[in-house]
Image: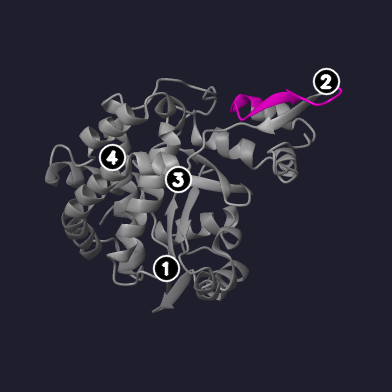
Amino acid sequence: MDNMRLFYRGINAKMAVKKYNGFLPAVIDQQVADSLCAIQAGNKNLSKAMIDKLKRHHLVIEKNSALYSTIPMLSCDLSLAIETAIKKRLDKDFAASSTIAKMAEKLADKWQVSSHVFVSQLVLGTMWFNMWLKLSDNKHNPVAVLIPDIDLNHVFYNEMYPILGNNVIVYWQSTLLGHPDTIYDILNDKYVTASIQSINEKFEFIPVGNALVLLKQLNMYKNRSDENKMPIPFIDLPKIDQALVKAVKGELQEVARVFYTNQQVLSEIAATFYNERAAAQGEVSYHNFRQMIYLVFSYCVVEAWLGSGLFPESVRIRDRKRKHNAPVWQIK
């Protein structure tokens, strides 16, 4: 479970901090995550200190001398079952691949360098996710899902790191960029973090430690020369601007229409799985539970796009991670 992930989106940051008595990504460290996994697997042997911490942050509820997690866990078997249900019930072009192909044709060369960022951040990460939230009963509440093993779960998510002003680094789970854990490890390295914090308005930065070696693996920077012909590293990543969005406005509207058409079926799938959820997830709210459907649906969408050859073929870093057997929690 070393590559466990917490999927977290807070529409109202103050509400999220209040709900969990702290910033959730900081609260759920590896030890807390392991404890939540143990609870949902039926393990009752937790220390009193850990139980008190879980209660303090409203991560568990105690009923009839038993602990129940309030954070849903997307186990490997559950994600596979959801994927099967989605593919069985949705139309063939549920991912709007034909519309994405029109975007690729319109944007031409720009698509070669920015397509993965464009669709993961704008289409899946913003447009579709926000629409999915707005169609829920508690659209302003923060959402959280624990993913115990990213290798074996059929899920997709993208993570964003702010670097300067409104600019962010976006990475996502795809063979285009390599194993998500490798990218995660690099972007969370203390030297990389310190280097990125030094970025100025020209996106130049001061390399700390072995940051250049690590960032080179992600093809994240280039060098330019100063007046003394000394190399100065700067962040060089695909960018999405207003002009790029306007160029494919019609296609984005069509993609939104397709998703809106899909959401009724997805909501029915979410309700079915929620009604049949495992006893260990009995105290998980429907609002949080249904986010697992979004994660698996997004995986199916990206899988369809990759299968249609809608992204350029390039692997920027090697995958040195090895898949391993993860603990599996049954659906029922």
* Image position of 235 with respect to 55: above or below: above
Residue at (21% x, 65% y) in the render: 275
Please tell me which residue lies in front, 255 or 326.
255
Q: What residue type is labelled 2?
A: Lys
The residue carrying mark 3 is 242
Residue 226 magenta-highlighted: yes
Task: Give the x, y percent position of residue 66.
Answer: 42, 73
Q: Earlier in the sequence, mark 2 or mark 3?
A: 2
Residue 301: image quadrant is top left
64 left or right, relative to 239: left
Please tell me which residue lies in front, 225 or 308.
225
Which portion, as a residue range, is magenta?
A: 216-228
118 left or right, relative to 301: right
Q: Which amino acid does label 1 sit on?
A: Thr
Task: Assign the C terminus to one quadrant of the image.
Answer: bottom left
Q: Earlier in the sequence, mark 1 or mark 2?
A: 1
The residue carrying mark 1 is 70
* Image position of 96 with respect to 281: above or below: above
Task: Give the x, y percent position of residue 252.
Answer: 30, 45
The residue carrying mark 4 is 301
* Image position of 68 with respect to 97: above or below: below
- Give the foreground label among 1 and 4: 4
